[in-house]
Amino acid sequence: MKRLSEEAARAARSPAVQERFAHDSAIPVGSTAKEFADFIALEQARWKEAVQKAGIKAE
C-alpha cells in the first residue's frame, strides 16, 4: 500500500494530471495518507457546527 500511495501522489503532482484537474476546476494535492486523514479530520471539525446549526440531515 505504501508504494501505491507514493506512486499515486507522484502522479497527482505530474504536469499532465495537474493540467487535467485544472480543466475540471480541481486541485490535485499528492499528499500522504496521513496528511489526507489529517485534512479530512480538520474539514469535519470545521463544518460540524455549521451543519448542526443549519439542521442539515443526510438523506
Image (tube, grey):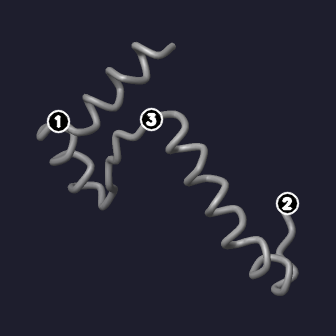
Q: Position of residue 47 (x, y in %)?
A: 69, 72
> Does the CB distance between marks 3 and 2 fall below 8 Å?
no
| Front residue (pair 51, 13) | 13
Give the side of residue 51 with respect to residue 2, left or right: right
Instruction: Name the residue rendered at 63%, 61% in the picture.
Output: 42
Residue at which label 2 appears: 59
Q: Residue furthest left?
A: 15
At label 2, which amino acid type do we have? Glu
Between label 2 and label 1, give the one nearer the viewer: 1
Instruction: Name the residue rendered at 85%, 78% in the picture.
Output: 52
| Disc 1: CA contacts within 10 A as few (<14), some (14-19) or many (>=20) | few
Using the image, tell me which numbered label, if any, was put on residue 50: none
At label 1, which amino acid type do we have? Ser
Using the image, tell me which numbered label, if any, was put on residue 14: 1
- Local secondary structure at mark 1: loop
Q: Position of residue 16 (x, y in %)?
A: 13, 37
Q: In the rendered image, which quarter is residue 55 located in? A: bottom right
Residue at which label 3 appears: 32
Q: Position of residue 54 (x, y in %)?
A: 81, 85
- Between the residue at mark 2 and the residue at mark 1, the CA separation in whole angstroms equals 37 Å
- Local secondary structure at mark 2: loop
Sequence-first tag of 2 and 1: 1
| Front residue (pair 11, 57) | 11
Relative vertical location of residue 29 with respect to residue 26 in this rendering, above or below: above
Between label 1 and label 3, give the one nearer the viewer: 3
